[in-house]
Amino acid sequence: MAQDYKYKRVLLKLSGEALAGDLGYGIDPKVVDELAEQIGEIVHDGVQVAIVVGGGNIFRGLAGSAEGMDRAQADYIGMLATVMNSLALQDAFERHGMISRVQSAINMLQVSEPYVRRRAERHLEKGRVVILAAGTGNPYFTTDTTAALRACELNVDCLMKATKVDGVYDSDPKKNPDAKKFDRITYMEVLNRGLNVMDATATSLCMDNNMPMIVFDLTVKGNIARALKGEDVGTVVE
């Protein structure tokens, strides 16, 4: 039940790559299904959940820009990729008995609602999962920055950053077997050490607005619920 959870309203940031699973590209229905199962557990217990999803499994704006494409145009293509991911998530959630709404920062009335903060809050209060698509609607801003911005706007208790590693390390644990994991770390330390938790804009936004963040391993089943109950999962950044 909701009283078992330390955090009652959360924003979950998913990378597009997380939805690709072992396929490496596109959307793996099995991964999306498992994710819906985990989120269904906490929603059923009364936790209010908003989600921001990236689009890197389909198109990454920075990569397009590096190949000579206009940066703004490439970023808009990336935003459209996040809408595709959001619709796939919505489909999985509703098959698992959750009511959900996709709100897009770029108007696409046939497939989503426009992002309206008060409407998003109302959906959360009614127990609906709100999937926030198309980034901020502006080029040059990452979906990490979107997650930080929406977390502050929607007044969530914490921002959850889902990754493929079990927290924040002082160096890349895949390259350095002696890398040290932090249980807790401040945003200022993250910035000073140049740790790639989120981009600097997103990190500064969370720091300025006292938004705690949990960085955790999404691939371990049940980690979302455990982290929200305040168990020792991942790294807390505050």
Image (cartoon, rainbow, N blue to C red):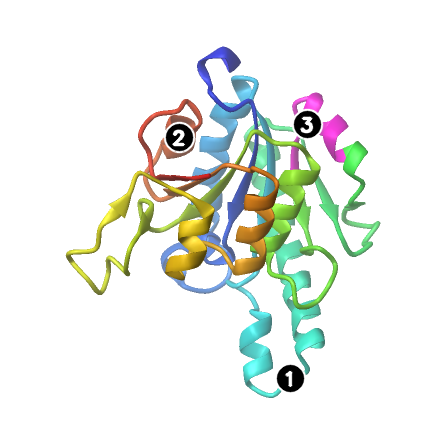
- CB atoms at circles 1 and 2 under 8 Å apart? no
| Residue shown at 47% from the left, 52% from the top | 19
Q: CA distance from mark 2 to mark 3?
A: 20 Å
Residue 124 included in the magenta stretch of the image: yes
Of circles 2 and 3, the one toward us is 2
The amino acid beneath tag 3 is Leu
Q: Which residue is mark 3?
A: 124
Q: Which residue is mark 2?
A: 227
The amino acid beneath tag 1 is Met
**Label 2 residue SS:** helix
Q: CA distance from mark 1 to mark 3?
A: 38 Å
Between 233 and 25, which is closer to the camera in this rendering?
Answer: 233
Q: Which residue is mark 1?
A: 69
| Residue shown at 19% from the left, 62% from the top | 176
**Label 1 residue SS:** loop
- Name which of mark 2 and mark 3 comes first in the sequence: 3
Q: CA distance from mark 1 to mark 2?
A: 40 Å
Q: Which residues are magenta?
A: 120-130
